[in-house]
Image (cartoon, helix red, strand yellow):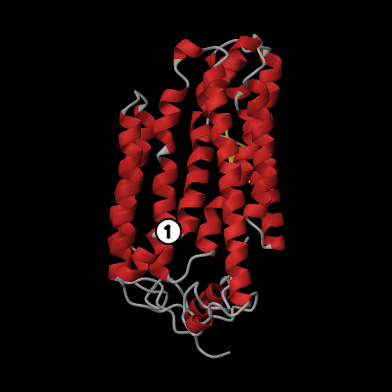
Amino acid sequence: MTKLRLVITNKEKKRCYIYLLFINEAIWLCGLACSTRLLPCRAHLETFVCGVLSFFALPNSLQSASFLTAEEKEFGGKRLVLDNPGSREGSLASEAESFKWSEVRRGILDLQVWLSASAYFAILSGLYSFGLFLPTIIKSLGFAKDANEVQLWSVIPYAVAAVLTGLSIFEKSHKILTRLLVVVAIVSDRLRLRGVVMLFTLPIAIIGYAAIANIDSPRVQYGMTFLMATGQYASVPCILVWLSNNSAGHYKRATTSALQLAIANAGGFLSTFNYPSRDGPLFHRGHTIVLGLLVFAWFMILLNVLYCAKINRDKRKGKYDQYAGYNDDRNPEFMMVL
C-alpha cells in the first residue's frame, strides 16, 4: 500500500476548533446561568478550560504525535482512510488541505446541518429535562424512603436505555451500575444507516411522551419513562455521527459538527423552563411540549434521509461529475450515509 500523506490538523484548524468550542460552551454557560444549578456550570467551565489547553497540548498532525510509534502512525493513517464513508475500501484519498473560508461557508449553508441540528435540539430538550420530573414521579410512588433512594430508583430507566445506547450508568456514589453493548450502534454500523435507524427509535420516545402527557397514574408514568429514555438515548449516537459521516474535508466537517452541537445544546434553555414546579407533579404541559418537539424531530430526520438519498441519486446520474477528483463530499465517489 502506498504511504499515506496525512495532515490531521494544523494551527489554523485547531484555532477553528477552539473558536467553535468557545461558542458551544458559551451557549451552555448562558443557559445554565438562567437556572440555579451551579454544578453543571462548573462541569462546563472545566470543558471550556480543557478546550483552551488542547490548543497547546494536541499535536498538529498524526506524524508529529510524539507519543505514537511509527507502526501506530501507519496503522492510524490506514484506519482514517478506511473510515471514509465514501466507500468501504476508502476509495477517496486522504484529506490534506489548507484553511479556506469557503469551506466554512459551505458547512454553514449545508441543509443537512439545519435539518439534523434542529432534530438534535428537539431531542436534547427532552433529555436535558428528563431528570427534572423523574424524581417527582418516583416520590409519588411512595416506595422510596429518602432522597437517596429516589435518586437510585431514577437510575433504572437509564439502565434500560443503556442496553440500546451503550451509556455508562453511574449511581450517585459514582459506582458503575452497568455498561452494556451498543445495540443501536452495531445495527447502524452494520447497515451503514443513521437516519433510517432513528426513524424507528424516536417513535419509542414519542409513544412514551404521548402516554405520560395524558395519564395521572404514577406507576404508569414511571413505566413510560423507560420508553422515553430508550427512544431518545438510542437516537443520540446516530445523530451525533451522521453529519460527520456526510461532511468532508476537514474544515467543513469541523464547521458542521460544531454548529450542530451549538444549536442542539441550546435545548438547555428550553429544558430549564419547561418543567416549572407549579406544573408538578404531573407536568402535562411540559410533556406535551417535548412530545411536539420529538414529532418535529422525526419529520426533520425523514427530510434529511430523503435529501441525502436525492444527493446519492444525483451522483449516480452524473450530476456531480464536475467535482470528480475533489477531496470532499462533492466527489461523485462520496456517497451520503442515509
Residue at x 61%, y 69% (from the top left corner): 312
Quadrant in the picture for the C terminus? bottom right
Residue extending furthest toward the bottom: 2
- Name the quadrant of the N terminus: bottom right
Q: Pick whichever, 284 or 142, lies toward us.
A: 284
Q: Tell whether 309 sits left or right of 220.
A: left
Residue density around tag 1, few if under 14, some if 14–19, many if 20 or more, within 10 Å: many
Residue 309 in the figure: left or right of residue 244: right
Q: Secondary structure at mark 1?
A: helix
Picture coordinates of residue 303, whole percent (x, y): 58, 52
Q: Position of residue 248 (x, y in %)?
A: 47, 70
- Decide if residue 89 is in sight here: yes
Above or below residue 337? Residue 171 is above
Q: Which residue is rendered at x = 54% and y = 57% of the image? A: 241
Amino acid at dot 1: Thr
Residue on which the image places disc 1: 256
User: Can you say whether 140 is above or below 94 in the image?
Assistant: above
Whether residue 172 is visible here, answered yes or no, is no
Quadrant housing residue 313: bottom right
Position of residue 49 in the picture relative to residue 275 (left or right): left
Q: Please tell me which residue lies in front, 68 or 192.
A: 192
Q: Residue at x 68, y 43 (%)?
A: 201
- x and y, in percent, of residue 297 in the image: 56, 42
Q: Is residue 332 above or below residue 178?
A: below
Horizontal side, residue 25 vs residue 214: left or right: left
Q: Quadrant of residue 227?
A: top right
- In this view of the protein, which residue sits in the foreground, 206 or 221? 206
How many labels were placed on the picture? 1
Q: Position of residue 58 (x, y in %)?
A: 35, 64
Residue lying at 57% horizontally and 22% vertically, measured from the top left: 134
